[in-house]
Amino acid sequence: MSADKDKIAGRVKQAAGDLTDNEDLKEEGDRQEEAGKIKEKIDDLADKAQSKIDDVKDALS
C-alpha cells in the first residue's frame, strides 16, 4: 500500500475506533498512519539519494 493510502486508511480506522469505542481499532489506525509516514520519509530519502547520484554522474561526464 502506498504511503498516502496507509495514512488515509489509518485515519479512517482511528475515526471508526473513536466512534465505536474500539481501542484496538484506534491503535491499529495509529500504527497504520505511522507506517504511512515512515514510508513517505523513506521515499523522500530515496529520491534525495538518487538526485545526489545523478549529480555525481553528471559531474563525471
Image (cartoon, rainbow, N blue to C red):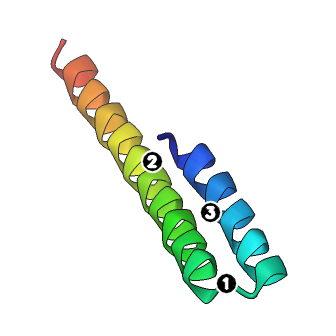
57 over 52 or under it: above or below = above
Which residue has dot 3 on it? Answer: 10
The residue mark sitting in front, 1 or 3, is 1
The percent position of residue 57, horizontal first and vertical second, equals: 20, 21
Which residue has dot 1 on it? Answer: 22
Side of 31 where 20 appears, left or right = right
- The picture quadrant where one finds residue 7 is bottom right
Which residue has dot 2 on it? Answer: 44
Q: CA distance from mark 2 to mark 3?
A: 20 Å
Secondary element at tag 1: loop
Q: Nearer the viewer, residue 13 or 46?
A: 13
Q: Nearer the viewer, residue 20 or 51?
A: 20
Residue occupying image coordinates x 45% and y 57%: 41
Q: Nearer the viewer, residue 25 or 43?
A: 25
Q: CA distance from mark 1 to mark 3?
A: 14 Å
* Mark toward the start of the polypeptide (1 vs 3): 3
Q: CA distance from mark 1 to mark 2?
A: 33 Å
* Mark toward the start of the polypeptide (1 vs 2): 1
Q: Amino acid at mark 3?
A: Gly
Number of numbered discs:
3
24 over 55 or under it: above or below = below
Q: Residue furthest left?
A: 60
Residue occupying image coordinates x 36% and y 33%: 51
The residue mark sitting in front, 1 or 2, is 1
Q: Amino acid at mark 2?
A: Asp
* Mark toward the start of the polypeptide (2 vs 3): 3
Secondary element at tag 3: helix
Secondary element at tag 2: helix
Residue occupying image coordinates x 57% and y 65%: 33
Q: Amino acid at mark 1?
A: Asn
